[in-house]
Amino acid sequence: MRINAGCILSSLVLSFLMTSGAMTSGAMADDAVDDAKEAASKASDAKAAEAVDVEIMAMNKELMASLEGRLNALPAIRETDADAVVTFARRGDLHLFLGKFAEAEADYRKMSVVKPEVDQSHWRLGIAMYLAGHPEDAAAQFDKYHSFDNVDRENGIWRYLSHRAAFGKEKAREQLLKYEKDDRPPFREVYQLFEGTLTEDQVLQSISPELPESSRQSRLFYAQLYVGLNDAVEDQPEAAIKALREAVKNEWPREAGFGPDYMWHVGRLQYLRLKTPAK
């Protein structure tokens, strides 16, 4: 019996091609399934985000009407009034929460005129300056606060954001305040984001799921708020909206009161600014 080597070779090649084709088709099918799953997941995420956006917009409409009513109900303020500082503070807060940043800055400045000793620790004035588009003035105000409290890294975060907006990332990093003591988390981790030693994902992943729920929500709120504000100043609006959306829907800051609630309003306003940019 004579063996035809050419026929055998042809058969082997054909067999290999058929097997290879089957493997390729299988791999392509797997890839198609993975792509479909990813597309479905993205569509689901987008639908969920859209639902949250609708909720936030409805809540915001009701909130703004309430804030306007409270502002209109305030009496006229005279600098000689015994409670002028408190009233200027209350009106400044309402102006800021309504997105009237220049008016808020003016009221906060008047607090320092009436009572100069409040100026050094006047972080609300620094935030109003930043939101009103005066980042250099804001940075100077946060410098004053650092001489009042050199442990509070949240002040350093705002100072960095102000320098970043005014002078760019390189100079802002060069001028980061130095801290010898740790502050409460996640402010150290956010600061490391600004230093360039942590990524945004690492900041969020540093928050353990095993924490008590209130502590976890507190840390998540501040991490998402400042990640979002950083994305905004880095001109990454979609990423900023995503992070700020999570911060705004977090219920902890509103329940916690004063400082956290104030920052919740800041996050809300920045989120709205990015979702509905001025024409």
Image (cartoon, rainbow, N blue to C red):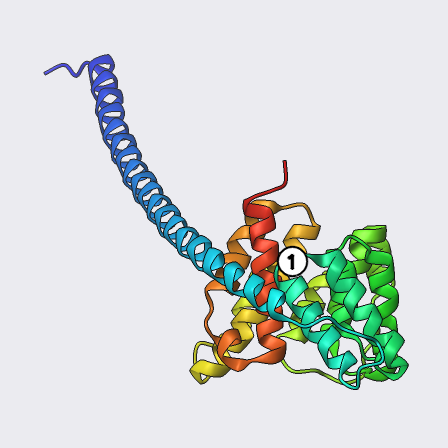
Residue 162, by quadrant, is bottom right
Q: Can residue 142 be seen at all in this image of the molecule? A: no
Residue 148, by quadrant, is bottom right
Q: Identify the residue at image location x=70%, y=51%.
A: 233
Q: Identify the residue at image location x=65%, y=82%.
A: 184
Amino acid marked by disc 1: Leu
Which secondary structure, mark 1?
helix
Q: Residue furthest left?
A: 1
103 relative to 217, above or below: above
Q: Position of residue 279 (x, y in %)?
A: 63, 35
Q: Nearer the viewer, residue 94 or 162?
A: 94
Q: Nearer the viewer, residue 261 or 28?
A: 261
Left or right of 175, for residue 8:
left
Q: Position of residue 135 (x, y in %)?
A: 82, 57
1 relative to 220, above or below: above
What is the count of numbered marks?
1
Left or right of 12, for residue 102:
right
Q: Position of residue 221 (x, y in %)?
A: 54, 70
Left or right of 86, for residue 14:
left
Q: Quadrant of the N terminus?
A: top left
Q: Nearer the viewer, residue 166 or 21?
A: 166
Q: Which residue is mark 1?
A: 229
Q: Neighbour class for label 1 at 10 Å: few (<14), some, many (≥20)? A: many
Q: Can residue 18 be seen at all in this image of the molecule? A: yes
Left or right of 122, for residue 200:
left
45 relative to 125, above or below: above
Q: Position of residue 84 (x, y in %)?
A: 78, 79
